[in-house]
Image (spheres, helix red, strand yellow):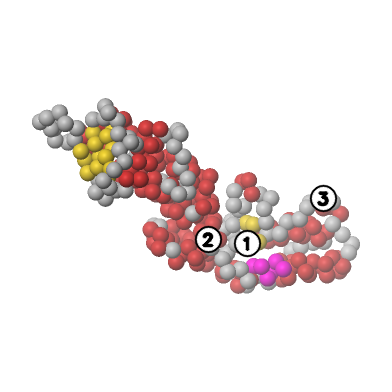
Amino acid sequence: MDQTIYDYPDGDIKFLVEGRIFCVHKRILSSASDVFKDMFDHATSEKDEAVSTVPLSQESAQSFEWLLSIIYHGSSFIVDSNNVSEIIRISDKFMVERAIEKSLFFLDDNFRTDPLNSLLVAEKYKRKPLFKVSSKLVLDDYYAYKKDPNYSRLSPQTCQALENRYNQYENTAMYFDEKSLTSGYKHTCRYADWHNKKLEFIIRNIIKLINDNENGKIYNIRVHRSNIKRNCPRIFWNYHVEKVIRARFGKLENLTDRDWRRKYLYMFIELNE
């Protein structure tokens, strides 16, 4: 039995978790959590001066140690992809707000690791930016995430919104053809016939990427913008294509503001309170 971690000689409350004893301070735990405060306020007083022991039969010692680490040493404790889900679970159970907030900050920057879990957490804690960016990656591989057992933990409203947004993409892609892409484009030069032939290869690739897509990622090809006024196909490539795709497929964004140079645009849904 490891009693070297969180076994304070001046502790006034003990927790027994998976055979481990944690001797800690009521005052510190009460200041971090109303659950602990109520637990201590309503505890039956002992006749002797022995420190009370509270068994936590349904908890893991590792998770409880992580929780105590944030309560006692919040700024130095590192939340990572290996512990974030469990920290959120136990923090929510004991209502330790600083632990929840620390985990949310981690997910804000690391949502790519587990988009579905990030979406679940964002929905629960009304984290609108995290909800939006996580939904982009869930929709990006919609069918795979829909089969995930955790998908059913999303609210019916969110599940319906994801389904509606993906169906919108599929229905549009089904009828997206060469005419959809070229309609409304006006050449900025005197070589329309020659440029049309040059654009055929671009158009075929774009249509193929959209029609063959199995997961909803909108592929938006970009090229270097130098000499754009002297190159009609570049205007088509860089501006017209994106304008048409946005108009036909609804609201699309880069994954994050830092990804605006990337080749992909993503569908998304937003959190409605």
Q: Which residues are magenta?
A: 205-210
Rounded to the nearest angstrom, the CA distance separating label 3 from label 2 is 34 Å
Mark found first going from the N terminus, 3 or 2: 2
Above or below, 188 against 177 in this view is: above
Q: Residues within 10 Å of mark 2 (few under 14, many from 20)?
A: many
Q: Amino acid at mark 3?
A: Ser
Q: Which quarter shows the N terminus?
A: top left
In percent of width and height, residue 185 lies at 76, 62
Residue situated furthest front in the rendering? 1
Q: Which residue is mark 1?
A: 218
Q: Which residue is mark 3?
A: 226
- Report helix, strand or loop for mark 1: strand
Mark found first going from the N terminus, 1 or 3: 1
Rounded to the nearest angstrom, the CA distance separating label 1 from label 2 is 11 Å
Residue at (77, 60) in percent of width and height: 236
Q: Is residue 253 magenta?
A: no
In percent of width and height, residue 195 lies at 84, 65
* Side of 173 relative to 102 (left or right): right
Residue at (76, 55) in percent of width and height: 223
Rounded to the nearest angstrom, the CA distance separating label 1 from label 3 is 24 Å
Q: Amino acid at mark 2?
A: Leu
Q: Amino acid at mark 1?
A: Ile
Q: Residues within 10 Å of mark 1 (few under 14, many from 20)?
A: many
Residue 13, picture quadrant: top left
Q: Main secondary structure of the magenta part?
A: helix
- Report helix, strand or loop for mark 3: loop
Q: Which residue is mark 2?
A: 139
In percent of width and height, residue 215 lies at 56, 66
Mark found first going from the N terminus, 1 or 2: 2
User: Could you say which is closer to the camera, residue 24 or residue 107?
Assistant: 24
Above or below, 254 against 100 in this view is: below
- Report helix, strand or loop for mark 2: helix
